[in-house]
Structure formats: structure tokens, C-alpha cells
Image (spheres, grey):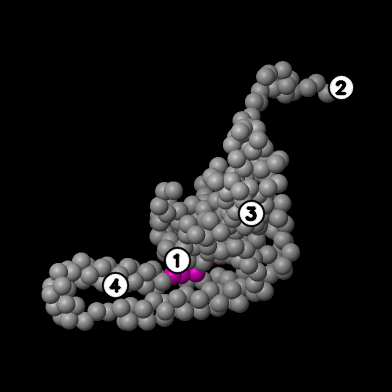
Amino acid sequence: MHEPNPISLAAKASDEPTFREVGVGPWSQTHPGEPRPDDPASPCYDARYDTALLDEGDRRNVLDRYRYWTVEAIKADLDARGRHGFDVAVENWTHDFNIGSMVRTANAFAASHVYIVGPHKWNRKGALMTELYQHVEHRATIEDLITQWRAGIADETAELEARLAASAPDRDALWAGARAGGMEHVVGDAAMEQVELRDRLNVLRRARVVALDIIPGAVPIETYRFPERCLMLFGAEGPGLSEKAVSMADDVVYISQFGSVRSINAGAAAAVSMHCWIAQHAVRP
């Protein structure tokens, strides 16, 4: 008869683990005596609250500020707060189980969009419902995606260039009018607008498609400076990115590894890469 492992026996005999409670219970329990925020007659009425969650409790894996909110309200708030300037794309030719994990990470780091390239169907289990809060779009081929993404950047650039040209002040006339009316701050406001538009324009002009893969010619992620606006490309577990994806990318970046395996899990690689962008560009919430 197989003897039980002593570590397993000790673990079962211990009083561990004790897990912390996640989320909140029904509104009536967590806020006794307080008016419900889904009641239109209540002074604290808020249309973002979900009646079913208020009744049953909210044990979802969401930030505390989103407790009891509807999915639509959370997604809209993330958009209003401003998602980050990077997009993520993953090729789905092998129906990779890592895609769900990538979507979940993209939501955690507030990626602008996630693009799934190839067949429409993908395994959602690893996403843990975070795809509901994230902009997830599908493209038939990597060429379609990159062509459309670059066209979108070009359209944004042209729009900002037009705004910059239209807002350029006649400085002599502006100064004369400002001095006459005691409104020197107007000049400052106009100048600040110009600076802001130029900064945004420079970000767009530096936008790049970045492929993440370990191939000859790739540069280490530890020394790579991610553009503020970029499209990160990830391939399937095993084969990596397609030849078309690599050929259309502006830069190819790899994650340095020091063990015996050639590559790390695709979901882990995506998480490392996204966090590198966060470490370089994001403002702490």
C-alpha cells in the first residue's frame, strides 16, 4: 500500500488555509438601514448599480469602487478614466489556451484594445469574465489588423495636425489684444494648447508595431523603450508569431531567459511585456 506523503499529512492536519473574504454581501447586510442606490426615489440613486448584485451580493473579481456596478457601467468608467496607449494582438491559429490569460492581463493594465487574429472562437475560461470590461475585437488576418491599425494612427495624426494648424495664433495680434484688455493669460492658454497638441502629435508619430518573439535580430526587452502608442503582437504557444506578423512589425523584442527552456508561457510573456510598458509610461492610479 502506498504510504501518504508526510508533507500532505502535515498539511491536512494543519489549520491552514484561511482565506480572506472577497467582495461584499447583499446591500441590506453590508449597509443596514441605508437607502438602496438603485431606488429612483432615493437621494443616493445611481443608475450604475445592478439590482441583482445589490440583492445577492457582489463576489466578482473587481476593484472595490466597482462593487454592485453593472458590467456596462464599469466598462464605461474605464473608458472615461482613459485606457492606456498600447493595444494587444494575439494570433489564434492554434486555439491557444493562453488567450484568456492575455485578455485578463490586458484588462488589469487597462490596454486600449485586444485584437484576436484568425478564427473567431477562443477559449474564454482564463479570462475570468474580464473580456466583458475590455474592448476585444477580431480580425481575419494579421495583415488586416496591422494595416487598419496604422491607418487609424494616420487618421489621428492628420486630425491633430489640422487642429494644430487651426489653433496657431497670430502672436502679434494676440499679444496686442491681450495687453489692451489686460488678458495676458489668454496668450498663455493658447500656448499651452499648442504644446499639448504637439506632444500628442509626437506620440502618434513615434507609434510602432512591436512583435514579441525570440528570433534572430530581436532586441532584449530589458533595454527596449516601448513607444507610448504601440501595438504589441503575440503568437501562439510553441510556434510563436507567424512570418507575416514578424515581417510587418517595426520592432521585434524578446524577453531574456536564463534557464533551460527556450521560451516562457505565452500568457506570462504577454504579462511581462505589458507591465514593461506600464513601468515606462503609466501614472500610478
Q: Main secondary structure of the magenta part?
A: strand
Q: Residue at x 22, y 70 (%)?
A: 186
Residue type at mark 3 is Val
Residue type at mark 1 is Arg
Which one is closest to the eye, mark 3 or mark 1?
Answer: 3
- The alpha-carbon separation of the residues under discs 4 and 3 comes to 38 Å
Q: Is residue 107 above or below residue 31?
A: below
Could you say which quadrant of the image residue 192 lies in?
A: bottom left
Q: Which mark is residue 229?
A: 1
- The alpha-carbon separation of the residues under discs 4 and 1 comes to 20 Å
Q: Position of residue 58 (x, y in %)?
A: 65, 42
Q: Earlier in the sequence, mark 4 or mark 1?
A: 4
Which one is closest to the eye, mark 4 or mark 1?
Answer: 4
The residue wearing badge 4 is 194
Q: Which residues are magenta?
A: 207-211
Could you say which quadrant of the image residue 133 lies in?
A: bottom right
Comparing 137 with 271, the one in front is: 137
Comparing 90 with 247, the one in front is: 90
- The alpha-carbon separation of the residues under discs 2 and 1 comes to 61 Å
* Secondary structure under the numbered disc 4 in the rendered image: helix
Asked if residue 277 lies left or right of residue 196, the reply is: right
The residue wearing badge 2 is 1
* Label 4 environment density (alpha carbons within 10 Å; few <14, some 14–19, many ≥20): some
* Secondary structure under the numbered disc 2 in the rendered image: loop
Q: Are marks 4 and 3 in contact (CB under 8 Å)?
A: no
* Secondary structure under the numbered disc 3 in the rendered image: helix
The residue wearing badge 3 is 71
Q: Earlier in the sequence, mark 2 or mark 4?
A: 2
Is 158 included in the stretch rendered in magenta?
no
